[in-house]
Amino acid sequence: MKHVLESVESQFEMFQILNEDGKIVNKDDMPDLSDEELKELMRRMVYTRILDQRSIALNRQGRLGFYAPTAGQEASQLGSQFALEKDDFILPGYRDVPQLIWQGLPLYQAFLFSRGHFHGNQMPEGVNALSPQIIIGAQYVQTAGVALGIKKRGRKAVAVTYTGDGGTSQGDFYEGINFAGAYKAPALFFVQNNYFAISVPVEKQTNAKTLAQKAVAAGIEGIQVDGMDVLAVYAVTKHSRERAINGEGPTLIETLTYRYGPHTMAGDDPTRYRTEDLDNEWEKKDPLVRFRTFLEEKGIWSEEEENKVIEEAKDEIKQAIKKADEYPKQKVTDFIENMFEELPHNLQEQMEEYKEKESK
Ligand SMILES: Cc1ncc(C[n+]2csc(CCOP(=O)(O)OP(=O)(O)O)c2C)c(N)n1
């Protein structure tokens, strides 16, 4: 009897363009980006690292609420977002706020989201996105639906979603990729494999050697990419987006990455489930370090330039937190008003009751 698992699994090799030393190891797939675009990618990664550091500090000062650290995952998050167009639709998870920011969500609104303020969930006109999903995997089913909608309307766009390695254990994950595959819906399904679902290691989630291979059963394309290599993530996203738009169906993209910080700021202590050696091993693969080396060797990036980005980021973050502080406080009627397009009668009654209370 023929056994196929080994031969299938061996086909999922990590796609890479820049190695840990910032050297090109795959010239053929090098994306066609101008020097300005390459610098913009670096700028965004530096900015996002600073935003992460400031957000952690603000959370500790009690000035932010829910926050899921992003440091380590910049290449995975921003390399993919950089390959999107304005018409594309993002369905993020709770850690994917940077993609929303670079797609056009103002920073002060991201801070309001973190505080549970309804305005943090209101995407500005022209930013096609849902607010970050907290229910693990649910965004995969929604993405299949959004992608089918895009296809039925004949739009040249894709629906893009993100979950973690833990998310691939959820039923919604399989339903989403299967449905999108069946309808050849233009969807990009990202799995950011940072090896831990809170404290549970990926080996305890699945017996599969890769998460990308889960695409096979859904009859869709699957690829594993170095999630610490921003050029590789960009190239894979761009390629998969083209395929999706050309009617060739969805892709499942596993990015191999790492979150340096805790799962969220709500009391998680990674030293209880990760060793220092493992942390050090991943820090050697850092996406900013390797891309900086590459750009410096090309002669288009300097310490001066980076410091300028850091100062700009700090300044903008300061202004955004001030704006979030000054934004009108949330009222009970805001919740009721923003929940439904048309209020059911029981909520209408509550609305009246609270309007009266709030007017006093
Ligand atoms: C349906 C559901 N079950 C459980 C939880 C609690 N929970 C929050 S985050 C998380 C782990 C998710 O890990 P992973 O998908 O790997 O994403 P990561 O946070 O590493 O990016 C769990 C179990 C939840 N939010 N939703």
Image (cartoon, grey):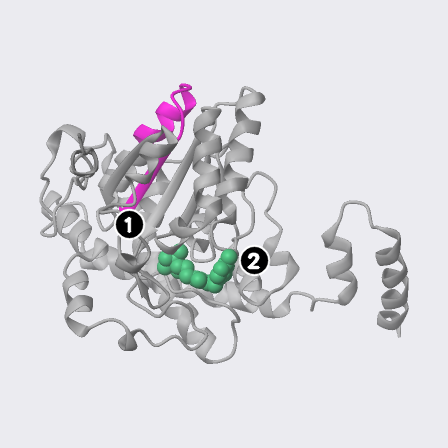
Quadrant into which the C terminus falls: bottom right
Residue at x 84%, y 57% (from the top left corner):
347
Residue, disc 1: 75
- Residue shown at 12% from the left, 47% from the top: 19
- Is-magenta flag for residue 345? no
Q: Classify 10 Å Cα crowding around label 1: few (below 14), some (14-19), many (20 and above).
A: many
Whether residue 70 can be seen here: yes
Q: Amino acid at mark 2?
A: Gln
316 horizontally vs 254: left or right: right
Mark 1 vs 2, N-terminal side:
1
Q: Place residue 60 in its image quadrant.
A: bottom left
Q: Which residues are magenta?
A: 238-256
- Per the image, label 2 sits on a secondary structure element best described as helix
Q: Which mark is residue 58?
A: none
Residue denoted by label 2: 109
Residue 238 position, x and y percent, is: 32, 31
Residue 40 appears in the picture as rendered: no
Where is residue 105 drawn, in percent x and y?
Answer: 52, 50
Q: Nearer the viewer, residue 91 or 313?
A: 91
Left or right: where does residue 98 sit relative to residue 31?
right
Q: Residues within 10 Å of mark 2 (few under 14, many from 20)?
A: many
Task: Identify which residue is drawn at 23% across, 30% down.
Answer: 32
User: Which residue type does callout 1 highlight?
Assistant: Ala
Give the distance between the C-alpha atoms of the residues marked 1 and 2, in whole angstroms: 23 Å
Report the side of 27 relative to 166 (left or right). left
Ligand 1 image-quadrant field: bottom left
- Residue located 12% across and 35% down the image: 26
Identify the element where label 1 is drawn.
helix
Residue 243 in magenta?
yes
